[in-house]
Image (cartoon, helix red, strand yellow):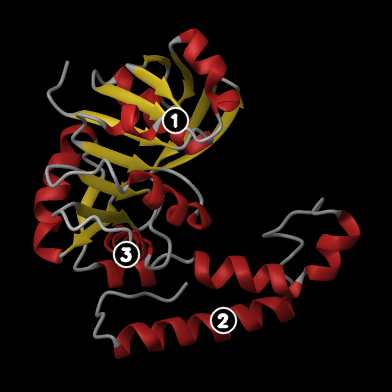
Amino acid sequence: MHDLKFAVVGAGHGGKAIAAHLAIKGFTVNLYNRTFSRIQPIKKMRGIELEGEVKGFGKLNVVTSDMEKAIRGVDIIMVVVPANGHISIAQRCVPFLNEKQVVVLNPGRTCGALEFLNILRKEGNQKDVTIAEAQTFIYASRGMGPAAARIFRIKQAIPVAAIPSRKTEMVVKKLNVAFPEFIPAASVIETSFNNMGAVFHPSITILNLSRIESTLGNFQFYIEGVTQSVAKILEAVDKERVMVARKLKCANVYSA
């Protein structure tokens, strides 16, 4: 067993994959999900079956919908929820986070770490909690059942940044004990502006609203949803992203 203790917040395909992988590696892992019915099969099995690039059964320490139980005594909290869930998770964490803990958003999307820290401060947590974000999610993964997940691929060289940036080296050093794939980024501005979700997701959605309504979403989002005209608009939006990043003195930003 390793000394580092993890909590994984979120039991979607990504949360299940990362929790199982950490457990298989020998780390103590607590799993939290807001809706208990989603994790009840995992609690019954006391873990998650992982297949694909990593195979095995990840035995979990705690499986709960109680945030205090999930994050009490852990060193690193891996938040693996959609971006629109960051506010709710931050609010639920507020009373229980302490200055020794590191929260990592997987991924932070666009300014996720800044938003998370802002919520903590607004809700009255003034402790020196370290908030960090990954530029993208470490796996290509999928849920394979209520208590199973598949990792299709483990990505390499995933940039991570903390607030403040002087803490990034410490965060990456801790994460590297479990995941050598994480590397330091200059700042959360860099990780945020190099995440392509803000360009692709809203643009393709808005430009396909009629199709989404008429098909009830039953089409290939990135293939059928991106025609030549849509692609031109994506390029224009992406140019604006790069321009804003450069105005913010972010040197390491790349076109999609």
What's the distance in space between the residues labelled 2 and 3, CA to CA? 36 Å
User: Would you name the residue on which mark 2 appears?
Assistant: 235
Task: Tell me what residue is drawn at x 57 percent, y 30 percent.
Answer: 143
Q: Amino acid at mark 3?
A: Lys
Q: Earlier in the sequence, mark 3 or mark 1?
A: 1
Q: Which mark is residue 17?
A: 1
Q: Which residue is mark 3?
A: 122
Residue 74, x across and y down, in percent: 21, 31
Image coords of residue 172 (percent x, y):
16, 48
Which quadrant of the figure has residue 32?
A: top left
Secondary structure beneath label 2 = helix
Label 3 to label 1, Cα distance in Å?
32 Å
Q: Which amino acid type corresponds to the residue marked 1 in the rendered image?
A: Ala
Q: CA distance from mark 2 to mark 1?
A: 33 Å
Of mark 2 and mark 3, the one earlier in the sequence is 3
Give 116 or 19, whichever is nearer the viewer: 116
